[in-house]
Amino acid sequence: MANEIIFSKEGVQVIKVADRVYFRRADWGAKEQCNSGYILLSDGVAAIDASTKEGAVEMMEEAAALFGKPITHVILTHGHWDHADGLPALIKGGAKNLIAAEGAVSLLEANGVKLPEFTLRIADKARFDIDGIGFEAFTFGKAVHSDGDLFISIPTHNLVFTGDAVSEAPFLFFKNGNAANWIETLDAMESLGFSTLCVGHGGVKDGAHYADQRAYIQALRDAMRAFIAKSGATDPSEEAGAKAAKEAAGDPANAGAALAVKINGAEKAISHMSQVYTLLLEGKG
């Protein structure tokens, strides 16, 4: 049965979202782990994302307990620490296959990670089959949340694992991304019509989530564009961004800031406005 919780323990839920497909939801506050996924194979399990070092150990234990199988494949949505730091542990535990975007693989190599025997680097898009399950993995050829975002879909189930390019608003992170590309990517993803979104942080979503996330990111951009136009700001530093975001949030005439605060609360909105301020001044907004 889809969306049945089959496991719940200490900030982790494993939810069946389709035949042989499971969403591992991790409570960030309790675990500081990303969401991930399990794809059940005949002789093993394909993991979507490797989580942290601690998370990877938990994932191997869960795969053995829930499915009686080891993790043999890893498919990364991107290379940030909370999605990829567990990769060496999974490889040591028997994962011999890695699939990731070229940007994510380059980041892993730069960090000295020894890649498994079989590594598929995806520059644009690829279709592949693992144990009778057809996958389509694709990028949009540009930075969104990171330089190596990869979307992993299973067309027969009309579902997609999005990584952090699609997440609930409190968990968005902009420092390595591009806010303008992000808006365009949400539009493109919405047009693909997936009914089930297994997001990087937060709960399972449907296609209505794109509009909510797009509205929030647009509010952040509007807020900081208005601030920059009004103040003439040119300093892209984090310190200047933090000050700018607080001033924007306190300006009753800044409609974008008011909307961002309404959507996500003052603390998170100010943090995100600060990050978007820097992106705008660096030409990434």
Image (spheres, rainbow, N blue to C red):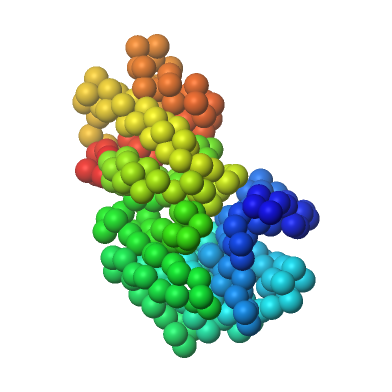
Instruction: Name the residue located 49 percent from the left edge and 81 percent from the top edge.
Output: 97
**Viewer-nearest residue: 208 or 239:** 208
Instruction: Name the residue located 78 percent from the left edge and 55 percent from the top edge.
Output: 9
Whether residue 154 sits left or right of residue 233 in the image: it is right
Q: Position of residue 8 (x, y in %)?
A: 76, 54
The correct choice, above or below, for 2 with respect to 282 in the image is: below
Instruction: Name the residue located 41 percent from the left edge and 33 percent from the top edge.
Output: 211
**Viewer-nearest residue: 267 or 285:** 285
Q: Position of residue 276 (x, y in %)?
A: 35, 38
Q: Position of residue 274 (x, y in %)?
A: 39, 35
Q: From this viewpoint, is residue 241 visible?
A: no
Image quadrant in which you'd find residue 103 = bottom left
Q: Position of residue 148 (x, y in %)?
A: 36, 61
Which part of the image, by quadrant, shows the N terminus? bottom right
Whether residue 77 sits left or right of residue 182 in the image: it is right
Which part of the image, by quadrant, shows the C terminus? top left
How many badges with numbers are in the image? Answer: 0
Instruction: Name the residue located 61 percent from the left edge and 54 percent from the top edge.
Output: 17
